Image (cartoon, rainbow, N blue to C red):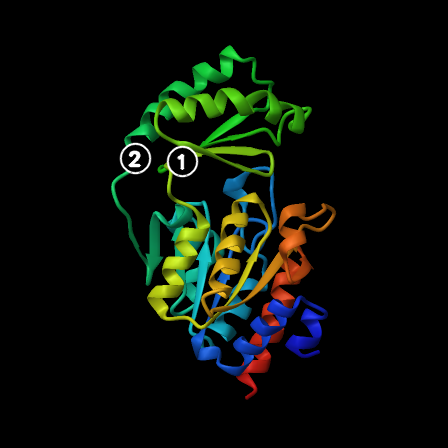
Amino acid sequence: MGFEEMVGPVTAAGRDGVRAVLAAPGDAVVALDFDGTLAPIVADPERARAHPGVVGVLRTLAPVVGAVVVVTGRPAGVAAEYGGFAGVPGLVVLGHYGAERWEAGEVTAPEVHPGVAAVRAALPGVLERVGAPEGTWTEDKGRSVAVHTRRTAAPEEALELLRAPVAELAAEYGLVVEPGRLVLELRPPGVDKGAALTGFLRERGARSVLYAGDDLGDVAAFAAVEKLRGEGVAGLLVCAGAVGDAPVRELADRADVVVRGPEGVVGLLGALGEELRGR
């Protein structure tokens, strides 16, 4: 099955994106979220690994498109390790929503926002004060701190209990809260996947982009692609709905195509890579 057939019915803007990528792949960027898009969602983020087919399809794609970039909230080096991306020549990882960059095995990044250290110290007391339920845990990402409720008895209720006090703590130290699937991440302002993606596309002089994501953190990237369409950059937006779980509705409603989790993303990218390589 060819790439266009696999994509299936899409919006008019999405069809333009498909055609632009196929017509001039050297001017195209394939941009991808990590967790939930390339790697299945797992209870312990440290155990997340890319789907077994990811490295193979990206190795096929990398030589025939302008660039392949992974845009993630994870530290760039961690995403590169968990994804096995050292095996994909030319691949770039924009970590911490673009605050870090991994390329050719090297990570570059600015200084860490001082509010992160303050929040890291204050957060345990806040969670104790508001009665965070058993199973709530924090993840230190170095440049941000995340509060997870996936392991609690009632994850959605726990998330709602923590939403306001976590937001107050973030604001006190000049940070913002990025919500996700059963997680609240406290991170510096002005850093998001939309800004990271836009900057990378301009750096590469891209004329088209395929972006795939699965969670609320990808909304900013979707919005960036929608804005860039108005500036002449064609775009195809892919929502990676997790198997057994409905995709995030806001992404699904804005997407040109919805696939089933990392397996669906691998199938889509594999079809694109084979079609381009066969030319």
Q: In the drawing, does residue 168 fall left or right of residue 38? A: left
Residue 194 position within the rendered picture, expressed as x and y whole percent measured from the top left: 45, 52
Residue linked to disc 1: 187
Q: Residue furthest bottom?
A: 279
The answer to whether marks 2 and 1 mark residues whose Cβ atoms lie closer than 8 Å is: yes
Residue 26: quarter of image: bottom left
Q: In the drawing, does residue 56 fall left or right of residue 27? A: right
Residue linked to disc 2: 113
* Residue at 30% across, 35% down: 113
Of the 4 image quadrants, the one containing the N terminus is: bottom right
Residue 43 position within the rendered picture, expressed as x and y whole percent measured from the top left: 60, 37
- Dot 1 amino acid type: Arg
Disc 2 crowd rating (10 Å Cα; few below 14, some 14-19, many 20+) is some
- Dot 2 amino acid type: His
**Residue 3 in the image: above or below residue 94:** below
Q: CA distance from mark 2 to mark 1?
A: 8 Å
Q: Residue furthest left?
A: 111
**Residue 199 in the image: above or below residue 244:** below
Residue 119 position within the rendered picture, expressed as x and y whole percent measured from the top left: 37, 24
Disc 1 crowd rating (10 Å Cα; few below 14, some 14-19, many 20+) is many
